[in-house]
Image (spheres, rainbow, N blue to C red):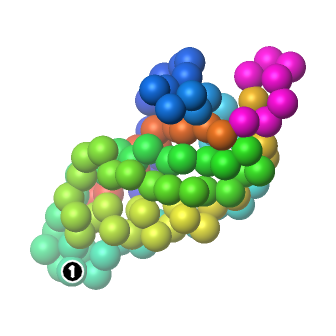
Amino acid sequence: MLICAVAVNGADATGRLRVPTAKALKAATFKVQPEYNPMARQLRLSGTVQVDVFISATGQVEKVTVVSGHALLSSGVVSALKKWKFDPLGEGDEKAMPAVTRLSFDFTP
């Protein structure tokens, strides 16, 4: 499985800091690898799952929204990401603030 980078900067419509993937991955202090769903493996499903990860000012994952990807593959990604932990994120000298980043996970049988 591969985590791909999707660079997006600035703030989103809710005022959350939009963090580039590379910065978010660097700030990740605890990661759980998504499991390849057994049925998806049996069906030899492959593909990419893209998700938006909403991170609190304290570094906890608040919400994971699937942007694209097969449901059999995306369920494992969402479950794993809810367990991730991040160092608090901010921009420049700003204090930590809620953030969102986009992550991609590739699955191949």
Image position, residue 60 (x, y; %): 68, 57
Q: Is residue 61 left or right of residue 43?
A: right
How many numbered marks does the figure carry? 1
Element assignment for label 1:
helix
Q: Which residue is drawn at 43% across and 63% down?
A: 78
Q: Residue at x 18, y 64 (%)?
A: 45
Using a 10 Å C-alpha cutoff, classify the residue at mark 1 as few (fewer than 14 neighbours), some (14 to 19) or many (20 or more).
few
Q: Main secondary structure of the magenta part?
A: loop
Image position, residue 9 (x, y; %): 54, 19
In the displayed structure, would residue 47 be above or below residue 20? below
Which residue ends up furthest to the left in the rendered image? 43
In this rendering, does residue 23 appear at all? yes
- Work out which quarter of the rendered image holds the C terminus and state it: bottom left
Q: Which residue is drawn at 66% across and 32% down?
A: 23
Amino acid bearing label 1? Met
In the displayed structure, would residue 42 be above or below residue 74? below
Image position, residue 48 (x, y; %): 29, 48
Which residue ends up furthest to the front in the rendered image? 14
Give the residues drawn in magenta, as a range.
91-97
Is residue 95 rendered magenta in the image? Answer: yes
Work out whether residue 37 or residue 17 is closer to the camera in this orientation and state it: 17
Q: Residue at x 44, y 44 (%)?
A: 52
- Work out which quarter of the rendered image holds the N terminus and state it: bottom left
Is residue 70 rendered magenta in the image? Answer: no
Work out whether residue 97 or residue 67 is closer to the camera in this orientation and state it: 97
Q: In this view, does 71 lie to the left or right of 95?
A: left
Residue of label 1 = 39
